[in-house]
Image (cartoon, grey):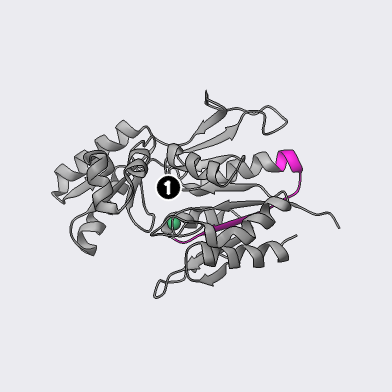
Amino acid sequence: MITRKRVIFTDLDGTLLDQETCSFEAAQTALRLIRSEGIPLILCSSKTRSEIERYRRRLENTHPFISENGGAIFIPKGYFSFPFPYGKELNQYVVLELGTSYPAILDALESIRREIGVKITGFSDLTEEELSALTGMGLDEARYAKQREYDEAFMVEGGKEEIERVKKKIQEKGMNYTWGGRFHHILGKNDKGKAVRILKALYENEYFSVLTIGIGDSLNDLPMLLAVEKPVFLQREGEPTPSEVPNLTLIQGVGPRAWNEAMLRVILNAH
Ligand SMILES: [Mg+2]
């Protein structure tokens, strides 16, 4: 039997990381197995490059990663053995940019605010101190979370109706809306799925036969789950099942404990 090269794409917030404490301690068993099996673990988050780089260091992860809901793919130089087209080089990476520039996104959000009169507070409207106080992030974390390049995270004052109006306006402007479990997001016509497909093609070029696994907990993860062969969804109590994703493995509960259980199950069964 030919063993396929397994590649795991994982969300961070509420998935590998605890939603409150951002700890991944409870996932250590599966993380060790993934490392010992030589499986690339691709961090794929709404977080910024600077935020993801911190977790990548803590996880001793040397693989490519995807920032800001598929805004860009960062690939360590020399990671793949063949040449491929990329947009720019940045430090030790080559970068494939899929997102719209942050200033253009802020302009769109500003005009939406003016047009519908809903109170919208984006990360760019807040100081590090305010963002930290509002979200419970540490000051450092708030600083990295504000270093946005392709996506604005925001809060909406009001209920479902206001959120629906904002969503509709974003779509009218030809941009994407998504929800990451804690914040709303406005971004260009990119999503995690597009980025996952591009990386998957690069892995296929390198290894020929690849088995992709994806794991997430929110709406912004669905494009990623639709792009992989083995999608896993961590489900909060009372949340609907994403029925549009075929072959879905559903795990009750979110965060690193659920991630650990899900990954052990999937890795041991996936060839
Ligand atoms: Mg999440």
Q: Nearer the viewer, residue 140 or 131?
A: 140
Residue 82 is left or right of residue 99, and the answer is right
The x and y percentages for residue 155 are 25, 52
Q: Is residue 40 above or below residue 239?
A: above
Q: Residue furthest bottom?
A: 238
Residue 216 shown in magenta? yes
Residue 82 is left or right of residue 41, and the answer is right
Q: Which residues are magenta?
A: 204-217
**Image quadrant containing the N terminus:** bottom right
- Amino acid under label 1? Ser
Residue positioned 18% across, 44% down in the render: 113
The x and y percentages for residue 96 are 53, 32
The x and y percentages for residue 120 are 20, 48
Residue 249 shown in magenta? no
Residue 5 is left or right of residue 51, and the answer is right
Give the total number of marks visible in the rendering: 1
Q: Which residue is mark 1?
A: 46
Q: Tell me which image quadrant ligand 1 sits in.
A: bottom left
Does mark 1 have its CB less than 8 Å from ligand 1? yes
**Image quadrant containing the C terminus:** bottom right
Q: Nearer the viewer, residue 17 or 267?
A: 17
Disc 1: CA contacts within 10 A as few (<14), some (14-19) or many (>=20): many
Residue positioned 63% across, 45% down in the render: 200
Q: Quadrant of residue 174?
A: top left
Q: Is residue 169 visible?
A: no
- Tell me the element at label 1: loop
Q: Is residue 8 visible?
A: yes
